């Protein structure tokens, strides 16, 4: 039996006799043990990465399947609207109306007059400055009647285009849904400016005693407001800002002292306005569609990011290791926005907040935004998630204001017929209101409140959910949804100033003789014609 005879240093006799064979020094013996350990670590790391990737993909797919099971759109391309003919597309007319010189003249920020500006451009900037500096459109009409008439004369074509747009079948802003979602834009600022113009025309007509024309302009304004609800959250926010202006203007109509309404005022146009204010379908669909669009935008952006960064063979291997973190972040964004879509479908503010609280019990905003782990694990969602607290307040505050405004108009109509305000809101049901509107800030189905005590007000209990008897917090005035109670005053002390209608020749009918985009574009011009003195034609 052969024995392995080694020397004192561990080398075999053959190694000692053969100078070409060098023994392994003792200091390198640990590598024989390290190689298996490293192999185990590499295998475990690969297995962990594969499990992490499969786990992340499974969570993302679960969110996608849940959205599909509810029949909701997810891909950005799924939001593309049905094609519309140009003559049926309100966006065509609104874009043309926004091209007037009134909105395209650039202001000069220098203290010295700009020599390149014409007298016409300087006059436009002067009128715009007066309107912007006025506390309200109604106040501008009272204090600057000649300037208001001059603005309406210049904007006659734009007003006609808005009337044509209000008669269209739908609206399509021409967003290319094959492009990245982050590139999608809509002319929100232009629509807000057009809404202010329509509000000016309505207030001018109302203060001159032409309430039928005033209501028609209001209906045009509501149509422009609904056109903002294009399925994007920014559009919904612009629509809510227009709602606030509409509610302020309704106060002018519904307040006896400041109102030009009288017993001879036709009831049908005002009843049509009441019905329009109570039609909340566009508002509700706008919030739901806005959060659906935010979810689709986040999904589209995350998928494009993954394709650009992680599916490129030349990418850094570290990125391949980190891909599951982005997938989990993507799944988290879908879950977050799905909770908001569900909350947006609730009928009241307390129900929406309860849904969010339940659905987002897992979400810690402070950890997500500020912790080291949140910054590392939620790279995309820190950029793409939208805070929703104020949005829900604004949404239900606007619904409350619309219901209060519609009820105030109904009270005014009742008062014109009976010579007094109703003792209870139930007296309005049937002839003036389909039912007493619910308070969207109440969680128990309570109606909006009404008190005849001085000063008489309609009110909602507001976001705190407590009935304070129609009290407005002076420190919050004129804030709407942050007051102690959300009130709508039924009396005022401002006197109306007569304003000759600069558009008395314009028919008040809700149709237009020629609503083709070609004719509209041909009639678009920088300045409107002078006010006509011909009597308005009778309605058919």
Image: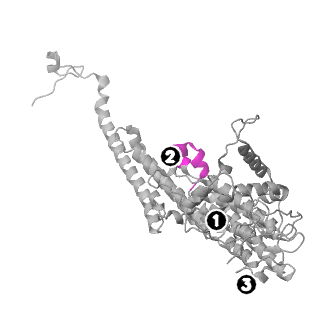
193 over 510 or under it: above or below? above
Residue 126 located within the stretch drawn in magenta: no
Marks 3/2 in contact by CB < 8 Å: the verdict is no
Identify the element where label 2 is drawn: helix
Question: Picture coordinates of residue 486 (x, y %)?
Answer: 77, 65
Q: Which residue is mark 2?
A: 377
CA distance for labels 1 and 2:
51 Å
Identify the element where label 1 is drawn: helix
Marks 1/2 in contact by CB < 8 Å: the verdict is no
Question: Picture coordinates of residue 398 (x, y %)?
Answer: 70, 64
Which residue shows up at 77% across the image and 76% down it? 410
Nearer to me, 389 or 137? 137
Marks 3/1 in contact by CB < 8 Å: the verdict is no
**Residue span colored magenta:** 363-383
Which residue shows up at 14% across the image and 20% down it? 14
Query: Residue 221 falls in which quadrant of the image?
Result: bottom right
Q: Which residue is mark 3?
A: 430
- Crowd around label 3: few <14 · some 14–19 · many ≥20 (10 Å): few
Nearer to me, 12 or 466? 466
Main secondary structure of the magenta stretch: helix
């Amino acid at each position: 039996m052969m024995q392995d005879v080694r020397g004192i240093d561990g080398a075999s006799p053959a190694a000692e006799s053969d100078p070409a064979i060098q023994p392994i020094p003792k200091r390198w013996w640990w590598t024989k043990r390290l190689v298996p350990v490293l192999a185990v670590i590499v295998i475990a790391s690969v297995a962990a990465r594969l499990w992490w990737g499969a786990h992340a993909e499974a969570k993302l797919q679960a969110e996608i399947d849940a959205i599909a099971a509810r029949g909701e759109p997810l891909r950005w391309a799924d939001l593309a609207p049905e094609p519309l003919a140009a003559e049926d597309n309100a966006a065509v007319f609104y874009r043309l109306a926004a091209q007037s010189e009134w909105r395209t003249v650039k202001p000069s920020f220098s203290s010295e007059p700009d020599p390149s500006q014409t007298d016409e451009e300087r006059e436009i900037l002067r009128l715009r400055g007066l309107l912007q500096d006025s506390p309200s459109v109604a106040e501008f009409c009272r204090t600057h009647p000649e300037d208001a008439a001059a603005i309406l004369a210049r904007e006659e074509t734009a007003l006609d285009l808005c009337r044509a747009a209000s008669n269209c079948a739908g609206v399509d802003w021409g967003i290319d849904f094959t492009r990245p979602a982050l590139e999608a834009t809509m002319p929100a600022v232009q629509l807000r400016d057009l809404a202010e113009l329509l509000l000016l025309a309505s207030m001018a007509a109302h203060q001159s005693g032409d309430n039928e024309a005033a209501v028609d302009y209001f209906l045009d304004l509501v149509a422009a407001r609904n056109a903002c609800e294009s399925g994007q959250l920014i559009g919904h926010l612009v629509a809510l800002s227009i709602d606030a202006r509409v509610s302020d203007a309704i106060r002018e109509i519904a307040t006896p002292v400041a109102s030009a309404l009288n017993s001879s005022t036709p009831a049908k146009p005002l009843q049509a306005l009441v019905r329009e204010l109570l039609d909340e379908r566009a508002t509700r669909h706008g919030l739901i569609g806005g959060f659906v669009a935010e979810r689709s935008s986040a999904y589209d952006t995350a998928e494009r990011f993954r394709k650009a960064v992680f599916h490129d063979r030349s990418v850094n291997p570290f990125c391949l290791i980190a891909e599951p973190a982005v997938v989990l972040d993507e799944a988290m964004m879908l879950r977050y926005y799905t909770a908001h879509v569900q909350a947006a479908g609730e009928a009241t503010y307390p129900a929406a907040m309860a849904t969010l609280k339940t659905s987002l019990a897992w979400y810690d905003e402070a950890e997500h935004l500020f912790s080291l782990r949140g910054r590392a694990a939620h790279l995309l969602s820190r950029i793409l998630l939208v805070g929703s607290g104020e949005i829900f307040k604004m949404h239900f505050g606007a619904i409350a204001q619309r219901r209060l405004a519609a009820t105030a108009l109904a009270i005014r109509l009742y008062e014109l017929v009976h010579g007094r305000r109703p003792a209870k809101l139930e007296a309005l049901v049937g002839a003036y209101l389909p039912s007493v509107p619910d308070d969207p800030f109440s969680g128990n189905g309570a109606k909006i409140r009404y008190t005849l005590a001085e000063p008489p007000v309609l009110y909602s209990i507001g976001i705190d959910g407590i009935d304070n008897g129609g009290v407005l917090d002076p420190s919050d005035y004129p804030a709407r949804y942050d007051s102690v109670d959300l009130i709508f005053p039924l009396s005022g002390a401002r006197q109306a100033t007569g304003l000759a209608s600069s558009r008395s020749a314009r028919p008040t009918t809700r149709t237009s003789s020629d609503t083709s985009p070609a004719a509209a574009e041909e009639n678009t011009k920088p300045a409107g014609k002078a006010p006509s003195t011909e009597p308005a034609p009778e309605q058919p």
